[in-house]
Amino acid sequence: MPQTLFTTPLIGRDDEIARLAAMLERARGGEARAVLLAGDAGVGKTRLLDEVAGRAARAGMTVLTGHCVDLGDVGLPYLPFTEVLGVLAADERFADALAAHPVVDRLLGAGTDAARDVGGRLRLFEGMAGLLADLSEIAPLLLVLEDLHWADQSSRDLLRFLLSRGILQRPAGGAPTHRLAVFASYRADDLHRRHPLRPLLAELVRLPAVERLELRPMADAEVTRLVHALQDRPLPEATVRGIVERAEGNAFYAEELLAATDTEAGGVPSGLADVLLIRIEQLSDTAQQVLRTAAVAGRRVEHDLLRDAVGLPEDELEAALREAIGRQLLIPAAADTYAFRHALAREAVYADLLPGERARLHGAFARLLTGRGHPGESAAERAHHYRESHDLAEALSASLEAAGHADRVGAPAEELRHLETALDLWASVDAAARPSGDGVDRVTLTLRASAAAAHAGDSHRAVSLTRAALASIGQDTDSELAARVRYTLAGNLMGVDSLTAAFAYSSEALAMIPAEPPTRTWVWAAATHVIAARHIGENETALRVAHQALRVAEQLRVLDAQADLLVSLAILDGGGRRTAEGRERLKEARELARQAGNAPVEMRALFNLAVGCFESGDLEGCLPWVTEGLDRARRAGLLSSPYPLEIRYLHLLVLYTLGRWDECVRAAAADAAVLPSAGGYAMGPVLYVALARGDLSAVERARGLLEGPFDWMATLVAGIALTEAAVLRGEPEAAVERTRATVGALTDDAGHRPDSSVRLAALALSAVADAAVELRSAGGESHRWKDTADELVELARQTARRGKGGTPQGPEGLAWLARAEAEWVRAVSGPDAAAWEKAVTAFDFGDVYERVRCQVRFAEALLVAERREEAATQAREARTVAERLGAAPLLERIDGLVRRGRLAHAPSDGERTSPLTAREQDVLRLLARGRSNRQIGEELFITGKTASVHVSNILAKLGASSRTEAVAIAYREGLIAPEPTASG
């Protein structure tokens, strides 16, 4: 077996492995095949071949590997084949075959002179083909040839012969060829136009038994997994993301970047830079000059811009470009541009520039970009080049221009980056040289940056920027601007769930400006204060301020403030957003926000319309609002902002609840590519699907949501998933502890618990009830769980009914309460059919999975009540749904219930004839385990009295005077088989 070269697991490449494994299977069956494996340097060709070779060896194949080596102009002929023959010579199994072929001596010894004439070469080629054929008769053979781009001419000629005329050729009559596969790899990025391997590859891929397999760069998610597998210490997520972005799917680059995290302050690791620069130093001086200039431009550069910056005549420039493209360092791109084949190559060239050379070229590009078309788009490039050329005043102006352009096109992350650059430059530029105009001051720019951070989904950065704006306020700052900073900070603090502080700042903002005469600033301060007051339970204050502010907003015709206040009133007034009145207010708010062009407020209205439908049990009605909300966010470029993130979560939650799990998973996969790091909670319903399908890897993903700064939604999602996992694993203590911790973390400063507490309590109760039932079944006392069960059911009751005088939760909350009540009864006294029937009915509003889980418990309770036909009906219906969902753990439980309850027994022809009924057989097996009548009854869902009757019947039918004698007779007669012992 070949030695494994790698200690880390192979990440990804499932399709490629499957394809190569199929080739090996065909080769073992006598159909010789060849694969030409192409890929850039470092993309993972050797790692893939090592994995496949290991599998081949484990399947009984002999693996022979030959390497081509870069020896420059002085090459050793047949080098990879002589390496293979050297390995074969050390294996006694092949001694006779080697002795039968003189080619071995000629290649291993000094006899290669025989290959100089045509006849000698032909005999050598035929001898090698014959040897491989004979070897494949002894054992299936995998021949691996690595790095064909360095192969000498003789090796290329021999490979051509073997694949076109030798070992792959099918004999006449369609007989099998040989039990042989050839896998040969080469670097695609090394094949310049005149590379000698090119014509050979073009010839070989036309052969019917030869395939080409291109190993493309790994997906970002796979590189992330690779980095996590390689790291021997925790790394900040931002560092991991940076490595993934720079590696661009190249495993070797990722490993080098990871290894350099302790020693390199940015840039390309020295070892990797040396590897990259070697290829560049092989170019002519002119081509190197062009690459250096292109590296300053960035990853991509327009032809005209490059021509003007490098200052070469057109013919010299074209010759240099042709050389760089031929060496696959640059590639032609769209719109008459050139791009570096890999970003790290560009970084290595850029880092190799002298400081003065770098600044000069940046200045040249900045000046060339000024006055070109699309000023907004080029502003970001100009800002970068001016900054790197140390012209800070021009860099500041260009950064502000770029930020304005990003705002107009709905790119908040880019707007934030440019504004932060401008803020960094602000103090370094003389006041006289700074741009002037309304809103161009440090405080206002910082507020703009905080809004961009919030829209980009970075709520904590938004808070820190707003705090910086507050710290910049002086005695002479306008009171309205000071109020804006405070209510903006309040809004951002609500985004990170710092609710008491948010209320304090919104109160300060409202107090800083008078209500008369009415102003827009006061209206927005009031609108923010309404939301903050509601969050801490000050509903009376919120309602009073909301009605007052709405009148002022209507008077001033501030449409988006009107809309925001209407949303708040729809939540606060009457029955809330679940009612028809609430929905009408929300629709009016959506229309006003649309007229005002305020996308965030419009999305707030759409989110609440969707949530109102969900809370009222109208799941299908929720989806159109979700779709509209995401579409609006997409058009505004705000998909990463808070409300669209919550809409994404709600979208997946609705699909999960409706039982459309595959659709939920597909939608999540599409979302994952564009979610900000802080939006991981939006994938929560996919974790619920994974757990329901028995995939406990979701546990680690759920724990990952708890890393970093506190996030309310992430804590909720993780709490639900980790409680579910504890239930699945049969760990009641862990389920209860997770529920307590989650509810505690999500309870606000006023003591208001989250609505989802009822769901968490019901889940934990199911684990507690399982433990209590098991204790009773084993003859123990289940009262030890009573206090815990009482605590959890009381939590569910108070949350679902919202205490004294509170508005009860909608159908979902009341359904979870019904389940909690049924689980509580099961925990303290045993299954109750009426309670479970109520729970099943409660989930009829549309929660497919929870309904079927309750249905299984209902069937168990029906069995205990000896209502067997009803139990069988419920179990049958539940199994159909569970099978459609792919809910494997639930399916297993249903099948166990059917077996234990004998709800669908059909004895096979081979079963031994027994005087006992099927039910009596079950009772007998439990008798053999020493169970009491009560324990037998609980395990088989019958009463203890019924179990006693079955035991009496068994004694009578077997002629036994005692339980022990009955078991002994049953063993002797073969009616039951002895169960294996632990040592067996």
Image (cartoon, grey):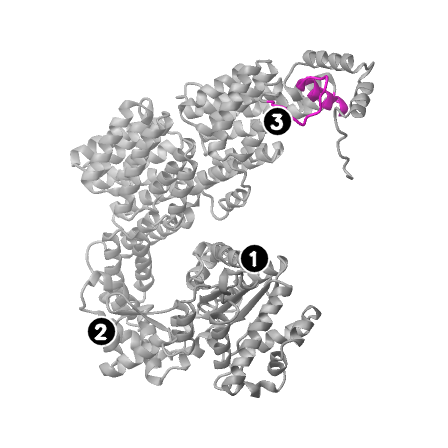
Which range is magenta?
905-931
- Left or right, 871 with respect to 451, comes to right
Q: Residue furthest front?
A: 173
What residue lies at 65% left-to-right and 75% top-to-bottom? 100
- Residue 482, given in percent of the width and then of the height, sits at 29, 47
In the depicted view, which residue is nearer to us: 698 or 929? Answer: 929
The disc, 2 or 3, on the residue closer to the chain's N-terminal end is 2
Amino acid tagged 2: Asp
**In the rendered structure, does residue 103 fall within the stretch colored magenta?**
no
- The answer to whether the residues at label 2 and label 3 have Cβ atoms under 8 Å apart is no
Q: Is residue 406 above or below residue 293?
A: above
- Residue 475, given in percent of the width and then of the height, sits at 30, 51
Pair 1/3: label in front? 1
Label 3, secondary structure: give it: helix
In the depicted view, which residue is nearer to us: 658 or 266? Answer: 658
Label 1, secondary structure: give it: loop
Q: CA separation, marks 2 and 1? A: 58 Å
Q: Is residue 91 above or below residue 791?
A: below
Label 2, secondary structure: give it: helix
The residue that disc 2 covers is: 304
Give the quarter of the figure containing the N terminus.
Answer: bottom right
- Left or right, 19 with respect to 371, comes to right
The residue that disc 1 covers is: 29
The residue that disc 3 covers is: 770
**Residue 811 in view of the camera:** yes
